[in-house]
Image: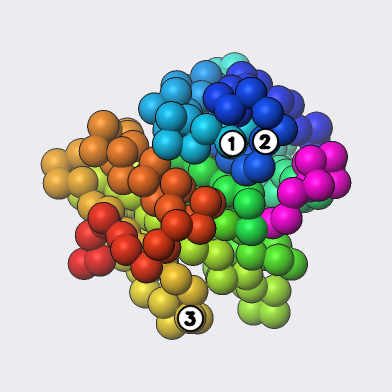
Amino acid sequence: MPEIIEGPKLAALSCGKPVYLVVMLHGEGEKGQDMADLALGWAPGMIKADFIALEAPFRDAHGRAVWRDPARPGDSIAEAAMALDAYLDEQLARTRLPASHVALVGFGEGAELALDVGLRRPEPFAALVGFSGAYYASGLPVREFSAAPTLLVHGEADGEAPFSGMLALKEALKARGAPVWSFKRPGLGHEIDGEGADAAGAFLARHVKHQNPQRQAVDHG
C-alpha cells in the first residue's frame, strides 16, 4: 500500500486547537501547493480549521505525480483509496475530531479519489467537494455508502472529464438519497476558476461549520 505524503499545511487562523479539518487532493500531474493556494482564500471563513494538502504517491512515465499506480492500471485508484482511508483514520484519532468536522476536497484525479473514499466512509464527513472530477470509474458503492453533503464544480467545456459525467454522477447520488449540489462553469475547461473556488469555500464554511446547510449558492441544474 502506498504511503500518503503530507504536503503544504495551513494551520487554523484562530491559533487555538483546530475544530475542523479540510484534506485536499491535487489533480493529475500537479502538486499539493496548487490545492493549498485555494485554502488561503477559504481560511478567513473557517478560522478554526486546519487545511492539509496531500501529495500523490506515484509517478507516471513523465515523472508527474499521480494517484493511480502506473504499474497496475487495472486497479484504478484502489491502492491510493486504501492508503487515504488509513490516513484519514489516523487523522481522526490524532485530532479526536468527529467525522462531521472533516471535509475532503479534490481536483481532477484527486476529486475522483476524494469521492471514492468519502462516499464509502463508515460515518459521513461534513462535506465533499469535487472539482472537474465527477467521473466515477468504480461505480457507486453497493453496500457501503456514506451520504455526505457533496458539491460538484465542473466546467462545461472540460475536455478531460466530460461535463456529462458530472451530471450523471449527480443524478446517481440523488437517486441514492445523497445531498448533492452542482456548480457549472460555462466555457471553462479542466481547471478551477475564481467563482468555482468561491462557491466551494462557501459550501465548506456552511457544512463543515454546520451553519444553515440548507441554503446553497450553487446551481442545482
Taking the magenta stretch, the answer to whether it contains residue 44 is no
Could you give the CA–CA distance between mark 2 and mark 1, rounded to whole angstroms?
5 Å
Whichever of labels 2 and 3 marks the residue nearer the N terminus, that label is 2
Asked if residue 93 is among those painted magenta in the image, a careful observer would answer yes
Q: Is residue 131 left or right of residue 23?
A: left
- The residue to which callout 2 is attached is 18
Q: Residues within 10 Å of mark 1 (few under 14, many from 20)?
A: many
Q: Which residue is mark 1?
A: 49
Q: Position of residue 151 (x, y in %)?
A: 40, 56
Task: Give how far apart the Cα atoms at labels 2 and 3 are.
Answer: 31 Å
Label 3 belongs to which residue? 177
Q: Pointer 2 and pointer 1: residues touching (CB < 8 Å)?
A: yes
How far apart in space, not on screen, are marks 1 and 3 (Cα)? 28 Å
Residue 102 place in picture, x, y as percent: 63, 49
**Mark 1 or mark 3, earlier in chain:** 1
Q: Residue 217 in the image: x percent, y percent?
A: 26, 55
What is the crowding at mark 3: few (fewer than 14 residues within 10 Å), some, or many (at least 20)?
few
Q: Residue at x 32, y 63 (%)?
A: 215
Q: Amino acid at mark 3?
A: Gly
Marks counted in the figure total: 3
User: Residue at point 44% right, 71% down?
Assistant: 179
Give the class, few, some or many, for how many residues have Cα within 10 Å of label 2's Cα (few <14, many ≥20).
Answer: some
Residue nearest the observer in this picture, 10 or 54? 10
Query: Is residue 127 shown to the viewer in this render?
Result: no
Between discs 2 and 1, the one toward the N terminus: 2
Q: Which quarter of the figure has residue 25?
A: top right
The residue segment tinted magenta is: 90-99
The residue most toward the left is 187
Identified by mark 2, the residue type is Pro
Q: Closer to the camera, 28 or 219?
A: 219
